[in-house]
Image (spheres, rainbow, N blue to C red):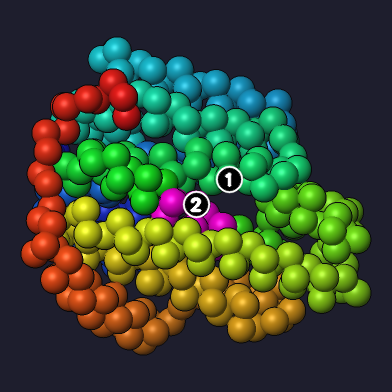
Amino acid sequence: MADHLVSQSKKDITKGSKSFSLASLFFSRQQKEAAWLLYAWCRYCDDVIDHSTSMAEAQAKTEELISETQKCYLGTSLKEHPWSGLNQIIHQYKISQKYPLDLLRGFKIDADGQKIKTIDDLLDYCYCVAGTVGLMMCHIMNVDRPEALKHAVDLGHAMQITNILRDIREDHLMGRLYLPEEFLAEENLNPQNFFDEANRPQLKKVADRLNQLADRYYVSGLKGLMYLPWRSAWAVSIALFVYRDIGRQVKAQGISAFDQRTVVSGARKFFLLICASLKLISTIPARLMEPWNSSQLNKNRSEL
């Protein structure tokens, strides 16, 4: 991979996500660099939408992102970073066009101001903006077993729900709401009053309910580690443990969690790295009973 692309993408992930940056260090060199390129493109697309000053601009920018992504698959994109990085990994790892376009469909939900009314709406959004990333990473990790793909999507669901719970305050200040309106209604809340000081106890109940849902998806994500090559499983498990800890901190902080963004300290991350490593070691017997199947990534590609 081009050194300048890798260098810039490394800067992007280091600046944008300390948790993912830490986890990525445990991949093999080739997978690590590919993960950085993928992150850089995802981060760029997210920033383009977030920095739009109007709904019309966000919608226009989304269409531009979709068009340029399609050009990458056609081999006609002439843009530099991060598009050149995306162009490199989608062809090298034969990543289906469906995945990046589904991710952009998630950004279109934001751009169009679509409301998250039901839990199904939330899970569809989580699939788009996070599950697809898990599926693209499966290509990079050379994993295509159907069981592994399901667990990858589930882990994406879990992490995105954690993101939503961590960012309730920030999203509210930006006029965004990702909590299902049906969950709010069950606590006599609505999009206008859910963040009122007096309603924090009810909001906490909604957050706890979503945290419980995320935990179930994290359990599925943990089960999926056995389908990954050892180093890949190590990297993914570290990201999983750190993100799951964010959700647990949100729950433990009570209503004060809505006053500031929850972060995991460096010392805490080191502890979680140890925990993730020990958990992975505990899967050795299962790996010996059913060794990881390094199937060809091109096989049944049209079905993925």
Q: Nearer the viewer, residue 22 or 190?
A: 190
**Res 255 → quadrant:** bottom right
| Magenta range | 154-163
Cβ–Cβ below 8 Å for labels 2 and 1?
yes
Of label 2 and label 1, which has the lower sequence position?
A: 1
Q: Residue at 29% across / 40% down in the picture?
A: 146
Q: Position of residue 232 (x, y in %)?
A: 19, 57
> Residue 115 at what x, y percent from top left?
74, 40
Q: Position of residue 147 (x, y in %)?
A: 30, 45
Residue 267 lies left or right of residue 27; in this view the side is right
- Per the picture, the main secondary structure of the magenta-coloured stretch is helix
Q: Quadrant of the C terminus?
A: top left
- Total marks shown come to 2
78 is higher (above) or lower (below) than 81? above
In this rendering, is residue 179 above or below 110? below
Is residue 225 left or right of 288 when viewed as pictured? Answer: right
Residue lying at the far front of the rendered structure? 289
User: Label 1 sits on what residue type?
Assistant: Leu
Question: How many neighbours does mark 1 have within 10 angstroms: few (below 14), some (14-19), or many (20 or more)?
Answer: some
Q: Residue at x 60, y 75 (%)?
A: 250
Q: Secondary structure at mark 2?
A: helix
> In the rendering, which numbered label is found on residue 157?
2
Q: Is residue 228 magenta?
A: no
Kind of residue at badge 2: His
Answer whether residue 119 is visible to the viewer in this image. Answer: yes
Front one among 197 and 10: 197
Judge whether residue 156 is colored magenta: yes
Instruction: Pick the quarter of the image with the N terminus.
Output: top left
SS for dot 1: helix
Q: Which residue is mark 1?
A: 123
